[in-house]
Image (tube, rainbow, N blue to C red):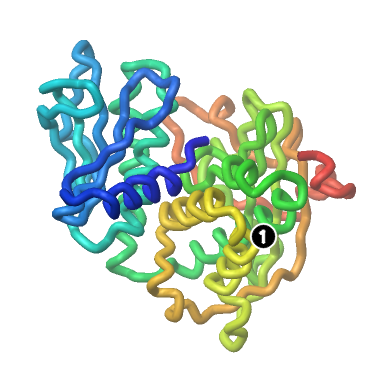
């Protein structure tokens, strides 16, 4: 994984030693098929990303998802040994928002440098831009809904109490894929974990939001982690920002992991600027773990009539009891 925070710091340090405050760029080391450059325009105080597209596969930038604060364009420029070449340019359009846009630009970059097929660029950009739209659209509502808070609390408990206990911070955060809108919340090599949370009035069932969430196709093991939560109006020490703060404290000696954690939270729509507005507390009532195998109560795409999809359904917890894991879940990961 690429340490983007280190790259940004390097760019910022160079700006302090040069007399001309112009645009400074860094080529990102990658084995992917697209040359990529991170840059800062110090005259304007903005972050940028340049991607050198392949001339054989045109990309229509007008069709890419848009959100406030990011401009996308095609530009002809000279950078990193490329003279008067066409680049896809991503520009932070609102000055003095560099903290969040370092995360946005870095995440777009990370998705591009992984590409091994030139035809996949448009799909990769569309996916990551749509994920970030969630964050910027949330600014209108400012804080996450109670339902979203519960889901995030469950995933954070699994991250902190289980993955951090077995893997490094960096690996654990890499395995946490829920913010990328993948089928499962955690993907650990050939094992996946789906995390579900229930509240005090709903401990007897949990909700599945698609026919893909409990699909174990291509996996060696698929586990379901069920966290039962109680909600409180008078426990400020148990709010979502408090839990996030505890994890930041764990990560404080690892700036790379801290930066990755910040990116993932933002992609969920969490903005720490509004932390004081989160007043609901969450206490962990019960933890249960199940293995999703043949016979587990679930709906799968292959069993549905043609034309049926995008399902949302509930599962009664008692029906999952025969599949419950009684041993320590860390031993299965």
Residue that lies at the very extreme toward the top in this rendered image? 56
Q: Does residue 146 show up? A: yes
**Across the whole image, how many numbered discs are drawn on residues?**
1
Secondary structure of the residue carrying tag 1 is helix
What is the x, y in percent for residue 160?
A: 68, 57
What is the x, y in percent for residue 35?
A: 31, 24
Residue 201 shown left or right of residue 95 in the figure: right
Residue sitting nearer the eye, 251 or 227: 251
Question: Badge 1 local density, few (<14 within 10 Å), some, or many (20+)?
Answer: some
Residue 16 shown left or right of residue 298 in the figure: left
The answer to whether residue 129 is above or below residue 53 is: below
Residue 246 lies in quadrant: bottom right
The answer to whether residue 284 is above or below residue 330 is: below
Residue 141 lies in quadrant: bottom left
Q: Does residue 313 show up? A: no
Instruction: State the residue position of label 1.
Output: 157
What residue sits 44% from the left and 68% below the top? 145
What residue sits 59% from the left and 88% below the top? 234
Residue that lies at the very extreme toward the bottom in this rendered image? 234
What residue sits 81% from the left and 43% below the top? 323
Quadrant that contains the C terminus: top right
The answer to whether residue 244 is above or below residue 101 is: below
What is the x, y in percent for residue 102?
A: 34, 51
What residue sits 72% from the left and 41% below the top? 223
What is the x, y in percent for residue 80?
A: 25, 26
Residue sitting nearer the eye, 269 or 33: 33
């Amino acid at each position: 994984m690429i340490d983007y925070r280190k790259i940004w710091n390097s760019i910022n340090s160079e700006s302090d030693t040069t007399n001309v405050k112009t645009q400074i760029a860094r080529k990102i080391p990658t084995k992917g098929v697209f040359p990529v450059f991170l840059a800062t325009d110090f005259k304007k105080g903005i972050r940028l990303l340049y991607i050198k597209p392949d001339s054989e596969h045109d990309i229509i930038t007008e069709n890419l998802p848009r959100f406030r604060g990011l401009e996308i364009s095609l530009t002809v420029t000279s950078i990193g040994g490329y003279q008067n070449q066409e680049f896809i340019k991503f520009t932070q359009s609102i000055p003095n928002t560099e903290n969040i846009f370092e995360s946005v630009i870095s995440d777009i970059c990370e998705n591009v440098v992984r590409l091994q097929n030139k035809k996949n660029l448009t799909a990769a950009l569309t996916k990551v831009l749509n994920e970030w739209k969630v964050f910027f659209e949330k600014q209108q509502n400012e804080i996450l809904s109670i339902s979203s808070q519960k889901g995030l609390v469950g995933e954070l408990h699994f991250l902190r109490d289980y993955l951090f206990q077995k893997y490094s911070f960096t690996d654990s955060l890499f395995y946490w894929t829920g913010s990328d809108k993948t089928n499962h919340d955690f993907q650990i090599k050939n094992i996946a974990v789906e995390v579900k949370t229930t509240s005090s009035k709903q401990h007897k069932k949990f909700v599945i939001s698609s026919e893909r969430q409990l699909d174990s196709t291509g996996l060696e093991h698929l586990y379901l982690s069920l966290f039962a939560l109680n909600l409180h109006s008078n426990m400020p020490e148990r709010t979502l920002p408090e839990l996030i703060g505890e994890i930041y404290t764990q990560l404080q000696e690892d700036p790379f992991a801290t930066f990755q954690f910040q990116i993932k939270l933002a992609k969920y729509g969490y903005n720490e600027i509004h932390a004081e507005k989160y007043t609901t507390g969450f206490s962990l009532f019960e933890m249960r773990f199940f293995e999703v195998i043949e016979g587990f109560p679930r709906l799968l795409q292959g069993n549905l009539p043609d034309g049926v999809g995008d399902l949302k359904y509930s599962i009664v917890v008692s029906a999952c009891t025969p599949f419950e894991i009684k041993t320590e879940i860390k031993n299965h990961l």
